[in-house]
Image: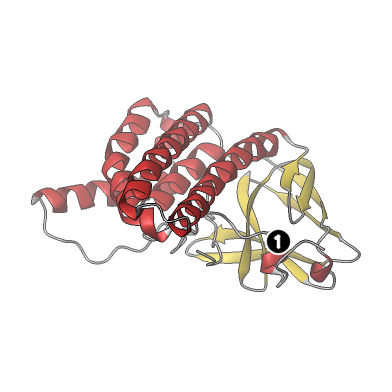
Amino acid sequence: MNKVLYAILPLVTLASCAGSYNIQGTSNVSSLDGQKLYLKVSHADTLKNIDSCDVVHGQFSFQGTLDTVRIAQIFMDDISFPFPIVLEEGNIMLKLDNTQQQVSGTPLNDKLNAFWTKFTQLRNQYVELDHEESAAILNGQDEETVNARLIKKALQVYAKGDKLFTQFVTDNFDNVLGPWGFITRYTYDTTPNAYPVWMNDYLYVNAVSQLPSWIEFVMTKATDAFKNNPQVKMLYTNYLQAQKEMSGMAEPAAPMAPVPGSMPDAPAAPPTPAEMAGDSVAD
């Protein structure tokens, strides 16, 4: 459960849009001082550095020009901070504190921040249920009874996440957030070991079983801009092929490359910047 989150970095872009961005970042994690941070975006099948900077007295910044709006990620060495950023024209404010991670200042980043805050809160609820399960077992309660009760709560959390992703994706069909949210949902729901151990198998099967109807719902509602996004088209093509194989209507294809930027493992809750820098608590 303490695995580092390699957050999703699909190449989601819109039409050309010349301009410049200015990211001003702050952090209260003292062990980040002196560390070099990298701003990366997906390029073909790799991650491309587009800027770097040092953290000095809790301050850091990235600047650059852009011809397309896209999702980016900040890395420390080869480890990504579990927090996406929209590179769009304007002044972007980023906080990488131990208790609060926030991006703001431009329209799409404000939307992304509102979604990410709710998403992280839901992921943290799985951790809280894990703690509740451990405490109940230590108090001598029957394990099967406890798990059955808490699985019901976990399914309610999942249902809230389903609504959150559906609203977010459909509200953002025609900008970079829609494809990013679509691929993020797909990746989380198809990632084994994404939940606390005692509930993982049940919730993983639940997520995978509900995913096909969600994908078809989104694609039925989607605009042409969304459907024609390269990463959405790749994911949907792979998904349809997998469905045909499962039904016996097609021979298994050669192993497919993952959607660019997808992550191999997703923990129940993202690590904090302090944990990534080697601290167990905030400074």
Q: In the current view of this chain or complex, which residue is farthest to the front?
A: 140
Residue that sits furthest to the left in the current view: 248
Q: How many marks?
A: 1
Q: Where is residue 1 drawn, in percent x and y?
A: 50, 64
Q: Nearer the viewer, residue 70 or 214?
A: 214
Q: Position of residue 88 (x, y in %)?
A: 70, 42
From this viewpoint, is residue 48 visible?
A: yes
Question: As rendered, which of 24 and 89 lies closer to the eye?
Answer: 24
Question: In the displayed structure, does residue 278 sit left or right of residue 32?
Answer: left
Question: Residue placed at 74% from the left, 67% from the top?
Answer: 37
**Which residue is rendered at x = 84% and y = 73% of the image?**
34
Q: Residue 225's x, y, as percent?
A: 46, 33
Considering depth in this image, is 73 or 229 the residue closer to the camera?
73
Give the residue drawn at x 37%, y 42%. 149
Does 270 sit left or right of 30 as displayed?
Answer: left
**Among the 4 quarters of the image, the one containing residue 14:** top right
Crowding at mark 1 (Cα within 10 Å: few <14, some 14-19, many 20+): many
For the point 49% across and 28% down, which residue is it?
167
- Left or right side of 142 for 130: right
Q: Is residue 233 above or below residue 3?
A: above
Residue highlighted by disc 1: 273
Residue positioned most to the right: 57
Question: Which amino acid, mark 1?
Answer: Pro
| Quadrant of the drawing holding the C terminus | bottom right
Residue 13 location (% of width, % of height): 55, 45
The image shows residue 124, relative to residue 252, as above or below, that is above
Q: Is mark 1 on a helix, strand or loop?
A: helix
Q: Can residue 14 be seen in this view?
A: no
The type of colouring in the image is secondary structure
